[in-house]
Amino acid sequence: MGSMNELMAQARHRLSVNDFHRMGEVGILPPESRVELIEGEIVDMAPIGSKHAFVLNRLAQFFAAAAGDRYLVSVQNPLCLDEHSEPQPDIVLLRPGNYMDRLPGAIDALLVVEVAHSSVHFDRGVKLPLYARHGIPEVWLLDLMGGELLICREPVEDQYRVVHKPGARDEMTPLLVPEVKWRLGDGKTWSVPY
């Protein structure tokens, strides 16, 4: 006989993306709900504080200015990874395309950026392995509390083989968008101890 956690894991009902959307359509999940679907479970998203919002807006502005027609900047929108997972990353640089009839998926993502304040442990322990498992080629995790940026590349199973912490003066370029160049310290007007 298994432990209580093992038995509970077997007894859980995993929601599908369709179930999740239907719950929103019929009002079970009100429009103002800040939730995402991770591995079939509805997960509350951390509240967005002023620092998180400001940094996210600055990054979105930067990526949009650099975009041209090379990619689409998606801000806090769903990314459908499979039948049971639809996270809402802070920023996704998407391949150009028409996403009117379907949500973008892992194959459409050039870069995922998560800005973490209170959610850093969840982002590292749950979302990074989820993104790696679905082959997202690169994830940037900007930890506002720890004052560091993690650049994660080369997904293999549930992890990234290459994890790099650049310094404030190091130039960062997404693998699939080499025209974009950014330094953590460039134009920095937020108070994070890098």
Image: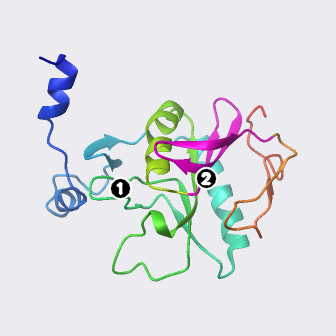
Q: Amino acid at mark 2?
A: Leu
Disc 2: which residue: 56
Please give the name of the residue rendered at 48% of the width and 53% of the height, measured from the top-left corner: 89
Location of residue 115 in the rendering, given as x and y in whole percent from the top left corner:
58, 45
Name the residue type under label 1.
Glu
Q: Say if 136 sits above or below 190 in the image.
A: below
Q: CA distance from mark 2 to mark 1?
A: 20 Å
Crowding at dot 1, Cα within 10 Å, few <14 / some 14-19 / many 20+, comes out as many
Q: Position of residue 126 (x, y in %)?
A: 43, 38
Left or right: 12 as drawn, with respect to 83:
left
Report the number of discs.
2
Task: Give percent across and percent down for residue 35.
Answer: 33, 47
Are dots 2 and 1 in contact, CB under 8 Å?
no
Image quadrant assignment for residue 164: top right
Give the SS element for disc 1.
loop
Name the residue rendered at 47%, 50% in the picture. 131
Q: In this picture, which residue range is highlighted in magenta?
A: 137-166
Name the one closer to the observer, 177 or 54. Answer: 177
Nearer-N-terminus badge (2/1): 2
Give 109 or 157, whichever is nearer the viewer. Answer: 157
Q: Name the dominant secondary structure of the magenta segment.
A: strand
**Residue underneath mark 1:** 86
Q: Residue at x 34, y 75 (%)?
A: 102
Task: Give residue 11's position: percent from left, percent from top.
Answer: 11, 33
Q: Quadrant of the C terminus?
A: top right
Assign a secondary structure to mark 2. Answer: helix
